[in-house]
Amino acid sequence: MRRVMLGAVAFLAAATVAANVSAYDGVDVSDGGSISGDVKYQGDAPAPAKIAVTKDNEVCGKEKTSPDLMVGADKGIQNVVVRITNIQKGKKLTPGTATFDQKNCEYTPHVLAFPAGSTVNILNSDGILHNVHTTSTANPSFNQAQPKFKKQIDAKIEKPEFPIKVQCDAHGWMHAWWISEDHPYYAVTDEKGAFKIADVPPGDYELEFWHETLGKQTQKVSVKAKEDSKVSVQMAKK
Ligand SMILES: [Cu+2]
């Protein structure tokens, strides 16, 4: 009995330590700075891959441009997730709703980032059968067909998870990524490769850049009160 009790105490102590390490503290940030910049492709960007469509052509068209690597005119890379990886305290994380559409047989947006605890409103603008099939580890996997009469399905993502792959089982080329974050300091680059993360408490941070086909890299950044820190990085195929 005594041994069991000791075991239970040790387990509780370990669980408390683990909770403290991962816990994020939401506070008021009045003197925050920001981090902004861009992500560019290093070298000559490859032409976007084309995918032949073999099904539902009347809605999906004949050909799709692969969303795996989208490089703009100035080499800006779209859909890079930028996030601070070592922040324990900052502005509050506010779960809400995020919209994820299936339109022209593509998922929109291709990379969707939201606070953990948010509900994803899944729409089907196409009027044909799609499905949303996630491969999760921290959260339960989600697999729901969405026929045309079902205008909206809601998926609540309770836990932080990075990244969650989303796939349509009806159309092999349709995939996307959901990012469920445990703090609010993240961004997804736009079509110019630009991003901005605001209201960051002054301090030294590590920024992580993740792209689905280019991988991950990190960069240190210092944030000063009410100032913007510029960060520009380049990514390339490894
Ligand atoms: Cu589909």
Image (tube, helix red, strand yellow):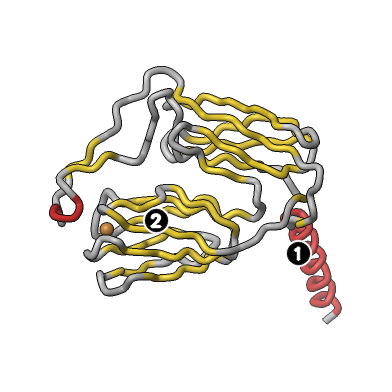
Query: In screen coordinates, is 208 left or right of 101?
Result: right
Q: Is residue 52 left or right of residue 37?
A: left
Image point (14%, 50%), residue name: 54
Q: Position of residue 34 (x, y in %)?
A: 69, 37
Vertical side of 80 occupied by 7: above or below: below
Q: Quadrant of the N terminus?
A: bottom right
- Which residue is depicted at the point 37% across and 35% down? 69
The quarter of the picture where residue 33 lies is top right
Whether label 1 lies within 8 Å of ligand 1 gets the answer no
Residue farthest along the bottom direction in this orientation: 1
Specify the amino acid type for callout 1.
Ala
Residue found at x 52% / y 38%: 210
Please determine whether, in this image, residue 5 is positioned above or below residue 33.
below
- Residue 117 occupies quadrant: bottom right
Q: How many marks?
A: 2
- Is disc 2 surrounded by few (<14), some (14 to 19) or many (20+) residues within 10 Å? many
Q: Earlier in the sequence, mark 1 or mark 2?
A: 1
Mark carried by residue 166: 2
Residue 233: horizontal and vertical position, in percent? 56, 26
Name the residue that disc number 1 marks. Answer: 15
Q: Position of residue 123 (x, y in %)?
A: 36, 64
Point out the frontmost of discs 1 and 2: 2
- Which amino acid lies under the numbered mark 2 shown in the image of this protein? Val
Q: Nearer the viewer, residue 11 or 87?
A: 87
Could you say where residue 82 lies in the image, as x and y percent from the top left?
57, 39
Q: Quadrant of the C terminus?
A: top left
Q: Mark 1: which secondary structure?
A: helix
